Image (cartoon, rainbow, N blue to C red):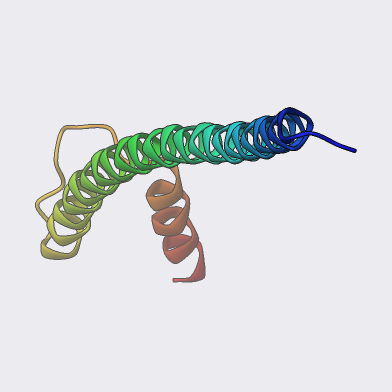
Amino acid sequence: MIGLRTYLALGLATAALAVGGYVWSLRAEIAVARSQIAGYERSIATLTRQAEQSALARRVEAARAERYAERAATLNAQIEAILTGDIPDADLDPRIADYINGLRQTD
């Protein structure tokens, strides 16, 4: 006949296996959670770099637009001076000079 000790030993072995399986499943869940966290951290780093690059691109584009606006104002002033007959001493843009020379040839 199987004694009480045998049942107790089988019960303890089963409990130990159950606890071991539970711990193993918890470790697997922790590993999955850590890999997800690492993925989120990489995504955050990538998005942060993209935001920094976008901010730099906006600053560069603003500087370029400002430079073109200044150049357009200068050219407009030169054109206005030409139209009013007050030709400035500064060098004209070659495109404007070509345009003026083209107008003179048609007269």
Q: Position of residue 51 (x, y in %)?
A: 35, 42
Near-viewer residue (41 or 33): 33
* In this picture, residue 27 sits left or right of residue 49: right
Q: Position of residue 31 (x, y in %)?
A: 61, 32
Which residue is rendered at x = 22% and y = 58% of the image? Answer: 79
Task: Check the picture and name the quadrant holding the N terminus.
Answer: top right
Which residue is rendered at x = 40% and y = 36% of the image? Answer: 53
* In this picture, residue 96 sits left or right of residue 85: right
Q: Position of residue 46 (x, y in %)?
A: 48, 36
* In this picture, residue 3 sits left or right of residue 92: right
Which residue is rendered at x = 48% and y = 41% of the image? Answer: 40
Which residue is rendered at x = 44% and y = 71% of the image? Answer: 107
Task: Identify the image quadrant of residue 23.
Answer: top right
Please identify the residue farthest to the right as the structure is shown: 1
Near-viewer residue (95 or 61): 61
Q: Is residue 50 above or below residue 72?
A: above
Please identify the residue farthest to the front as the structure is shown: 1
Q: Is residue 100 above or below residue 30?
A: below
Task: Identify the image quadrant of residue 71.
Answer: top left
Near-viewer residue (6 or 64): 6
Near-viewer residue (43 or 23): 23
Count the labels in the image: 0
